[in-house]
Image (cartoon, rainbow, N blue to C red):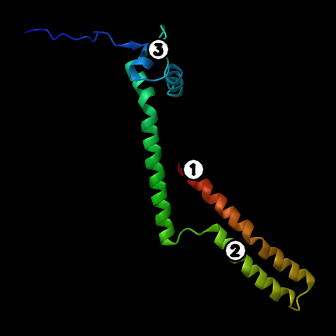
Amino acid sequence: MSRVQTNIPSEPLRWSVIRAAEEFGLDQVTLRKRLVKSESVPDDTGCYGTLQIISAVFDDSKTLRDLEVKERTENYRLKNEAIKGNLLDKGSMLAGLEISYQSVKNIVMGSLLSEKDKKDILDNLARCPLILDEVSRKQALEISKKE
């Protein structure tokens, strides 16, 4: 049986940043940054394994693809929620509340209620936008917990 000739050594390949940058067509600084970002640690000679280099070189594209898929999924989820009527436009909601507030305010101010009662009613109504902000903040917090 004949032996196959190869230029690959029997021991694992080790790459210097300079040689790996040349091989993969990257600037040395860029490769170093990517190695740090991927938390790759060189051996005692300052060289990296092939898997470390490959992960640093190609991990950005995988991360970007994963992020894009996640964003698309979230976008579809939000569209579905909007179609179901589970989402409300905050700006439109506040505009509607403002119109209602002005109408109720006119009625209350023209009523025979005491000044204290009028003030209490209008103060309570004025809290509606604050309540809407609080609900919105809590929803955002819940969404960020799920991520």
Instruction: Please state which of the two labelled residues, at mark 2 or mark 1, is closer to the viewer.
Output: 2
Residue at x-position 82% and y-position 78%? 122
Rendering quarter of residue 3:
top left
Distance from label 1 to label 3 (Cα)?
Answer: 42 Å
Q: Does residue 69 sit above or below 136 in this rendering?
A: above
Image location (x, y in percent) of residue 52? 42, 22
- Residues marked 3 and 2 touching at CB (< 8 Å): no
Taking depth in this image into account, of 30 and 9 the one nearest to the observer is: 30
Report the residue marked by disc 1. 145
Q: Is residue 6 left or right of residue 62?
A: left
Of helix, strand and loop, which one carries label 1? helix
Which of the two discs, 1 and 3, labels the residue nearer the N terminus?
Answer: 3
Question: Disc 2 vs disc 1: Cβ atoms closer than 8 Å?
Answer: no
Q: How many marks?
A: 3
Circle 3: residue type: Ile
Q: Residue 18 — which label?
A: 3
Q: Residue furthest right?
A: 115
**The furthest residue to the left:** 1
> Can you give x and y, in whole percent of width and height, for residue 91 in the image?
66, 68
Q: Which residue is located at x 74 percent, y 76 percent?
A: 98
Give the residue at x 59% y 55%.
142
| Residue at image mark 2 | 95
Q: Nearer the viewer, residue 86 or 116?
A: 86
Residue type at mark 2: give it.
Answer: Ala
Q: Quadrant of residue 125?
A: bottom right
How many other residues sit within 10 Å of disc 1, few (<14), some (14-19) or many (≥20)? Answer: few
Measured as percent of width and height from the top left, residue 14 is found at 39, 13
Upstream in sequence: badge 3 or badge 2: 3
Mark nearer the N terminus (2 vs 1):
2
